[in-house]
Image (cartoon, rainbow, N blue to C red):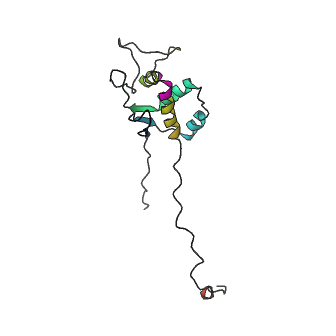
Amino acid sequence: MTTRKTGFRRAATVPVTWPEDHEFHGLEVELKRVTVGHYLDVRHLQRTDIEEMLQEVAGALVSWNYEDADGNPVPVTGMAVDSAGVPVVDADGRQMTEAEVAVRGLDIAMLRAVFRGLVASFSVADPLPQGSPRGGPPSINEASIPMTPL
């Protein structure tokens, strides 16, 4: 009878925060992890690809603590509707998600900062530090090693 090894599941999301001296310190964003294939698709985006950045951030956005100017939380979890309950649609007539509407409300600097957080989530941590430094030659007497074939 074989013993089944336990599986490993990586967290489906990655938190993004900013250091104390950053303009967006205090903003906490949770983004979906993306696949290598997705990374290869978006890594080419340049500063001018604002529409694509909007789509990428909106598609990855799971939650955040962002508030509007009146201090109300900006939702990102459902389909967008206006105050009358009418679905919010884009120029093509497709209903937009709350995340898409929320991201469109960001200023360019904040959009870029969140997008950089998304791109940074693709990176791999630095390798572990090197082990102990090399020592000298082995402390074994070579004459004690048998040299005859077995």
Q: Residue at x 57, y 83 (%)?
A: 140
Q: Quadrant of residue 4?
A: bottom left
- Foreground of the two, 122 or 71: 71
**Residue depicted at x 52% and y 67%:** 132
Q: Is residue 140 left or right of residue 96?
A: right
Q: Is residue 109 left or right of residue 63?
A: right
**Image height of 104 relative to 117, above or below:** above
Q: Quadrant of the N terminus?
A: bottom left
Residue located at (58% from left, 29% from top) = 47
Magenta-tinted stretch: 103-110
**Camera-nearest residue between 51 and 88:** 51
* Residue 15 or residue 90, whichever sits in front: 15
Q: Give percent across and percent down for residue 79.
A: 41, 21
Asked where in the image residue 19 lies, by quadrant, the reply is top left
Q: Residue furthest left?
A: 71
Main secondary structure of the magenta stretch: helix
Q: Residue at x 49, y 32 (%)?
A: 113
